[in-house]
Image (cartoon, rainbow, N blue to C red):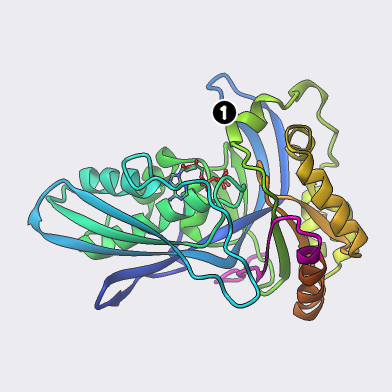
Amino acid sequence: MTRAAIKPRKTARGWVLPAPAKLNFYLQVHGRRDDGFHELTTLIAPLRLCDTIVVSATDVATAEIKLRVTPALAPRGDASPEHSPVPSDERNLIVRALRRLREAAGVTRGATVTLIKRIPSLAGMGGGSSDAAAALRAGEAAWGVSLGQRKLHELASEIGSDVPVLLSGEPSVCRGRGEKIEPVHLPAGIPCVVVQPPAALGAGQVYQSLDVTSLPRCSPEGLSELVFALRGGELAAAGRLMLNHLQSPAERLAPAVAAVAQAFTRAGVLAHQMTGSGAAYFGLCQSLRQARCVAAKLRQQGLGWVNVTTTMGSSASYS
Ligand code: ATP
């Protein structure tokens, strides 16, 4: 079950909500299921880096969901990520999410939506999924409807495997194809350096080239030891315990990913790996000062888009 960690805010422009990016600190693939999805265990942490979505309801009865996508201005020192084009029609997960919500809640009005895009696309950072999750929450607020957490979670998992966890906005261990969520306590503010190399990897492409018969074996305690290390700020231990079964196939498809991995090692970062199906890659740092220093080194090497951000923590305590 998911809880609303982040709530929409009413403004003159409409209902505004941040849609956080995510990193996978752990991603174990167990195998391919009969329905074509892969069975996973993954530890997901939402980030301060986010898109922003603004939703307002139209006054008249219309089924139209009008979406405008605008790139965000790059913050000082950061170049804008080079986005693969983000569609503004029904291929956009925001439009799909709002249509599903409209149907499920019996809404007759349409909506206008602005998406301010900061999260790189095709990066494994959950950009589209998080936008969809934010659209569900902002759509409920704009149309003045409430489906309840259970139904909203159900809609979210129909839209995409990562949508439920991003709807919750909590660091979580996710199982199944990602929709079975268990919130875990992780500290807020872990400094992260994220690099998006100039390689767009589709999740389908990476999963297809994964050989599920030869995945490295994982210690059953690995994940809980990782959570423990992250809570204690022990980055060397976290680095040894982090895992992403999709990294090897992604490196074969995009050698730029392996180049970024080597650059993080040379920069002295103890915990680093690819997120999701890539191609974005991240390192965890002891302090923001170290993160800025590492980011400056990586920028000089022209490896791609480099961003410094931090993790969002849990809104409640868990064991
Ligand atoms: P994930 O980490 O969930 O695998 P990703 O980073 O690989 O996500 P997204 O940025 O979510 O990928 O985009 C994947 C594709 O989905 C893109 O090709 C894009 O055309 C489409 N898309 C649909 N909606 C969105 C959206 N709101 N933002 C970005 N891309 C979107």
In the rendered view, does 173 fall on the left or right side of 242? left
Numbered range of the magenta stretch: 298-319
Q: Which residue is at 47% across, 41% downward?
A: 160
Q: Quadrant of the C terminus?
A: bottom right
Whether residue 310 is in magenta: the answer is yes
Residue lying furthest left: 60
Res. 232 image quadrant: bottom right
Q: Position of residue 68 (x, y in %)?
A: 32, 56
Residue 232 visible to an observer of this rendering: no
Q: Does the magenta segment cover residue 4? A: no
Report which residue position mark 1 lands on.
37
Give percent across and percent down for residue 202: 59, 36
Q: Residue at x 82, y 68 (%)?
A: 297
Q: Residue 99: give x, y in percent of width and height.
A: 26, 44
**In the rendered image, the vertical position of residue 207 relative to residue 148, given as above or below:** above
Q: Nearer the viewer, residue 200 or 166?
A: 200
